[in-house]
Amino acid sequence: MRQFFIFIKCELGRTYEVAAEIVDSLAETRQVHSVSGAYDLLAQFAVEKEADIGRFVNTKVQTISGIKDTQTLICFNAFTSDKGLGEA
């Protein structure tokens, strides 16, 4: 699995609605957090190794009503108790 995070900026007053839609409609969602700063949400996703992350973001996330902007962070490695030897 490939892990990645997306910072999401929502239309005013729609953050909770957008978060619920992400959790309810995208099976690839691992967690969604409300955050402070330039973005409203930080969402974690996991897709199959051969998946096109750009296409996933473009067609599944950015098309959700209430989303104004996104910034995607692709993970290289997950450092865990197994010393980061597991797959990210």
Image (cartoon, helix red, strand yellow):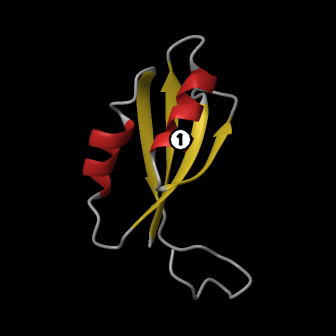
Identify whether 5 is placed above or below 40: below
Residue at 51% in and 81% down: 87
Viewer-proximal residue among 21 and 77: 21
SS class, disc 1? helix
Viewer-proximal residue among 34 and 77: 34
Q: Residue 75 at what x, y percent from top left?
A: 49, 64
Identify whether 11 is placed above or below 5: above
Q: Residue flagged by tag 1: what amino acid is it?
A: Asp
Q: Residue 66 at what x, y percent from top left?
A: 45, 20
Q: Is residue 58 left or right of residue 71?
A: left
Q: Residue 54 at what x, y percent from top left?
A: 28, 50
Identify whether 86 is placed above or below 72: below
The quadrant the N terminus occupies is bottom left
How crowded is the residue under tag 1: few (<14 C-alpha within 10 Å), some, or many (20+)? few
User: Residue 15 falls in which quadrant of the image?
Assistant: top right
User: Residue 62 falls in which quadrant of the image?
Assistant: top left
Q: Residue 8 at what x, y percent from top left?
A: 50, 33
Q: Residue furthest top?
A: 12
Q: Which residue is mark 1?
A: 24
Residue at 44% in and 25% down: 67
Residue at 28% in and 71% down: 50
Identify whether 70 is placed above or below 1: above
Residue at 58% in and 33% down: 19
Q: Is residue 24 left or right of residue 31?
A: left
Q: Is residue 26 left or right of residue 51?
A: right
Q: Is residue 31 left or right of residue 3?
A: right
